[in-house]
Image: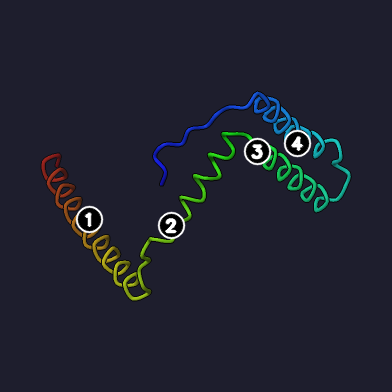
């Protein structure tokens, strides 16, 4: 991971963010205005406009920094050692056994305290 990400803001960045937000707002308003059009077409239109807005936002300095962060996160994700099926099943069984054991202990404690209270009250 890069510890020093220096981003220089371009004067066009504010304009690009305004354009990206305007595209998103246009997609939302267009979805409401064209309510009589089929749902599939509206979904495709909104997804396409969101993709355009994302691509405009990605050209800003903050957008490029975010894309670098996503790439670095993906590299770190690949380094994770995932458990095997057997390890997952064994861990799940241990958790289930502990939950059942704690439930039995709490049920016994509740029953004991309930018996004590009912004996005192009468």
Residue at (63%, 40%) from the top-left corner?
58
Distance (Cα) linking label 2 and label 4: 33 Å
Residue at (19%, 53%) from the top-left corner?
111
Q: Which residue is mark 4?
A: 28
Q: Secondary structure at mark 3?
A: loop
Distance (Cα) linking label 4 and label 1: 53 Å
**Measured along the vertical axis of the image, is residue 81 above or below residue 72?**
below
Position of residue 27 in the picture relative to residue 60 (left or right): right
User: Looking at the rendered structure, which numbered label has been put on residue 59?
Assistant: 3
Q: Which residue is mark 2?
A: 77
Q: Nearer the viewer, residue 110 or 75?
A: 75
Foreground tag (4 vs 3): 3
Q: Residue 6 appears at what percent x and percent y?
A: 48, 33
Foreground tag (2 vs 1): 2
Distance (Cα) linking label 3 and label 2: 25 Å
Q: Residue 70 appears at what percent x and percent y?
A: 51, 48
Residue at (59%, 38%) from the top-left corner?
63
Foreground tag (2 vs 4): 2
Q: Reading the chain from its start, which is encountered first: label 3 or label 2? A: 3
Furthest-right residue in view? 36
Q: Nearer the viewer, residue 95 or 88?
A: 88
Q: Reading the chain from its start, which is encountered first: label 3 or label 1? A: 3
Q: Nearer the viewer, residue 17 or 27?
A: 17
Distance (Cα) linking label 3 and label 1: 60 Å
Position of residue 109 in the picture relative to residue 6 (left or right): left
Q: Residue 61 appears at what percent x and percent y?
A: 58, 34
Neighbour class for label 3 at 10 Å: few (<14), some, many (≥20)? some
């Amino acid at each position: 991971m890069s510890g020093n990400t220096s981003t220089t803001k371009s004067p066009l960045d504010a304009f690009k963010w305004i354009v990206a937000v305007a595209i998103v707002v246009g997609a939302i308003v267009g979805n409401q205005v064209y309510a009589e059009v089929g749902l599939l077409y509206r979904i495709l239109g909104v997804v396409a406009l969101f993709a355009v807005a994302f691509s405009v936002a990605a050209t800003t300095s903050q957008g490029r920094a975010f894309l670098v962060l996503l790439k670095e996160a993906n590299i770190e994700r690949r380094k994770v050692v995932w458990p095997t099926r057997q390890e997952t099943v064994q861990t799940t069984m241990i958790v289930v056994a502990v939950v059942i054991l704690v439930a039995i202990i709490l049920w016994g404690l509740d029953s004991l305290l309930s018996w004590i209270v009912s004996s005192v009250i009468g």
